[in-house]
Amino acid sequence: MPALTLSETRRRIAQGESCESIAEKAVAAAEKSTHGAFVSVNRDKALETARGIDLRIKAGEQPGILAGIPVAIKDNLCTKGTATTCGSRILEHFVPPYSATVVERLESQGAVIIGKTAMDEFAMGSTSETNAFGVVRNPVDPTRVPGGSSGGSAVCVAEGVVPVSLGSDTGGSIRQPASFCGVVGFKPTYGRVSRYGLVAYASSLDQIGPFSRTVEDSALLMNIISGHDERDNTSSMHDVPDYTSGLDDGVKGVRVGIPAEYWGEGLESGVRASLDESVKALEAAGAKIVPVRLPSTRYAISAYYIIALAEASSNLSRFDGVRYTGRAKDPKSLLDMYSRTRSELFGEEVKRRILIGTFVLSAGYYDAYYAKAQRVREVIRREFEHAFAQCDVLATPTAPTTAWKLGEKMDDPLAMYLSDIDTIAVNLAGLPGLVVPVKPSAGLPVGLQLVGPAFSESLLFKTGRAVELQGAP
């Protein structure tokens, strides 16, 4: 099926193409995908939903902004009546009795959910290789990783199966796969989008956001999923503007900060060349390039992996074999059921992170690790504030390299963790980040990351659109 954008798909429906026909093409493409993007494809429900939308359109109704648009959902977002596994054996048979707020909002606007996308187990990984149900492959080069943890959501958009999808981002899990697969990925300000129905990894860091083929499509999806939700007490009361308004206003006078700490050691020369070219294009379009400093960036990974893993240890304690999870067979006692369920059904990476998180929260180590990491987090947040006093947005690499080979970092967790150096600090500070594809390096996708102050989504989309207009990759 041709790789259509959301806007193009809407136009075809407006011109008379049936929603059922579009859904059928998307479902067939999902079922034929050879890159492992989907954990499940819900053919019957998707086609039934599409037929219902067709009938409403024929009756003169307006089913919504996304009427008939095929959408894929990361498998850690609850979908009523459809399994939500988080890529883990421990939730292999879990079918939620409710849907996440973002799923409800998409469906209320007529979206057709065609399936759940593959991910690193419980969103813990940067490669989408820790999924218990199979490896996800990069559609540009199937011998390489697609990034993670939202690899499946990035891949299905890059393949053209769906025009848009949803992922989650705790330390770069939307932005890094977007960069590796050559699509647009957006992580909103913390609290901009409700987390209700998202299976938590690290509650103070997690955010839900879109993948798309264009900046405009991500902006449109953000119009729908943003806004306060009384079921999530961390969701913001800020009004939601129309993010598609003023997209083509240009960047004349916009101050683009270049933080030295992101452009130094470890950045591949080919990646740097592509990113430099896009920054120069912004300058040519009227933006003012400003050097800034974020000196505590070097502490971000250490702080992140203490805070995130501590929260993960707490959040994942509920998966014990008692309620909605899988359970070890024939336990000899309650303690045996607990220990065997978690040791047999959690993957190695998840168990590693739980153990580290439990350790840093334990008596005698809390102050030495967790409390100190929280203080570093506040320093990082204040440094971003200082930088934004000098500029309007920041431009950085999304990852220091292009996608690496499958299996290359699976036996070296530290190397995998270090690959998140360019994205993690944004989550620690709760800021929005947009990734836009730029010129490839050696045939592999590269993404420019744009970061703004809290609730500066509109400015990021406008700046990202300017990058996009400088030339398709």
Image (tube, rainbow, N blue to C red):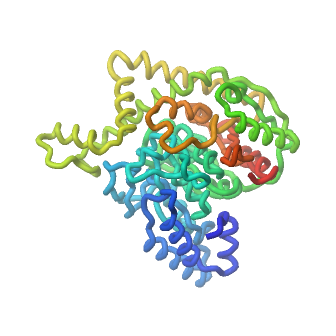
> Farthest residue toward the left?
332
Residue at 27% across / 40% down in the picture?
342
Closest to the observer: 422 or 100?
422
Q: Position of residue 2 (x, y in %)?
A: 65, 69
Closest to the observer: 225 or 302?
302
Q: Position of residue 406 (x, y in %)?
A: 51, 44
Residue at 39% across / 23% down in the picture?
360
Residue at 46% across / 32% down in the picture?
413
Closest to the observer: 445 or 430?
445
> Farthest residue toward the bottom?
59
Q: Quadrant of residue 350?
A: top left
Q: Is residue 125 left or right of 448 when viewed as pictured?
A: left
Regarding residue 237, the answer to whether it shows in the image is: no
Q: Position of residue 331 (x, y in %)?
A: 14, 44
Closest to the observer: 199 or 38?
38
Residue at 83% across / 43% down in the picture?
281
Q: Position of residue 404 (x, y in %)?
A: 57, 41
- Above or below residue 297? Residue 133 is below
